[in-house]
Amino acid sequence: MYMNLSYKKYLFGLVVVSAVLAAVSCSKSDQEVTDPAKATTEAKAPEEKVLNIYNWSDYIAPDTIANFEKETGIKVQYDVFDSNEILHAKLIAKNTGYDIVVPTSNWAKQQLDGGLFQKLDKGKLTNWKNLDEGILKQMAAFDPGNQYLVDWMWSYNTVGINVDKVKAALGDTPLPENAWDLVFNPTYTSKLKSCGITFLDTPTDVFQAALHYLGRPVYTGTPEDYQAAFDLLMKVRPDIKKFNSGGQIDDLASGNTCVAYGWAGDFNLARKRSIENKTEQNIEALVPKTGGILFMDVMAIPADAKHPDNAHTFINYIMRPEVTAAITNEVTYANPNKAATEFVDPEIKNNKSIYLSDEDIAKLVPPGVEDAQTKRNMTRLYTKFKSGV
């Protein structure tokens, strides 16, 4: 009897406890469902004051980040890279840790199609109105509706030279009419190797220029075109001193090299640094008569960015005319901000190798995209070319 009574009390206790727990659980559940204000507040909790940026080296004014941090209270971690291949590898591996990246347009197209970026919220970009419509139209070719990308700076691939050293190395041989001969014609490279020739260390940039020199489509998918470009490159391979994407500026500015295949903006920056450092190197970015290869470096927010609101704040900040102009004045690259032109230093604004004439702009090869199989073939051939095998 005692055992039965105790057992009944035990069961009754379990029922009571269960009922209380169920009521509490139900009450909590109901509160979560019927209290949207709380849910909205939690969903829109402000981001931590942190922003992680991955950009090209030598591509920002000295005080850009400091001024942004002071104004917004957002702490910026600013890292740099020197090739699209490095950035792309991080993006496809996911979980980059970055909130803003700056790929070149042809790579950005591939990354956008792969779902690696998130769409811009233009409601947060009040300075969008400052952007040049012509640049936006060009970008719309690979970013329809300009929904994901914002141009950082633009320039073109070409040849940069130390004029005095090149003339001395060539001797009685005059400068060629076509600037591309200086890096792709053995008649010239065999003489210029004495003062140093450098190439960008990226397969896409090197093969695009070689294809253009040969008069073949720059963004071809035909293996025979790439083989022809490879054969051309191998003829000048013994004359190339080094492959260097990040150090061409200092090499030219210091006089360590005399010819470089690379980015016009970097060559103008080398000239600027040479003047500042009083190394007296006469450096020029050449404008080839057959045209250079146009590129745009663009800001994008990775799909896995942890601070997208802060990223929008930074992008909007960069689109201020005075901020963009300050970067152009420092790095000697043309910018996409029409409202910024009045703030650009006259020496830069009037430099015809930075702000090209309409005639020279018309000759530029517009941005394009190679397919994945072509990129693999290109990389394989580039590895052979660089190793000299």
Image: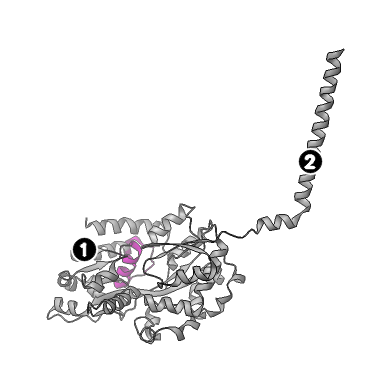
Q: Tell me what residue is drawn at x 46 percent, y 86 percent.
A: 342
Coloration mode: one colour
Give the numbered dot on residue 237.
1
Q: Amino acid at mark 1?
A: Arg
Q: Tell me what residue is drawn at x 24 percent, y 67 percent.
A: 198
Please report the bounds of the magenta region as a residue range.
200-225
Q: Nearer the viewer, mark 2 or mark 1?
A: 2
Q: Position of residue 204 (x, y in %)?
A: 35, 64
Q: Position of residue 13 (x, y in %)?
A: 82, 27
Answer few, some or many: residues within 10 Å of disc 1's Cα (few below 14, many 20 plus, some between 14 and 19). Answer: many
Q: Does residue 15 lie above or below 246 as drawn?
A: above
Q: CA distance from mark 2 to mark 1?
A: 77 Å
Give the numbered dot on residue 24.
2
Q: Position of residue 15 (x, y in %)?
A: 83, 29
Tag 2 and tag 1, C-beta contact below 8 Å? no
Q: Does residue 35 lie above or below 187 as drawn?
A: above
Q: Amino acid at mark 2?
A: Val
Residue found at the far left of this picture? 172
Q: Does residue 51 lie above or below 13 as drawn?
A: below
Residue 118 can be seen in this image: no
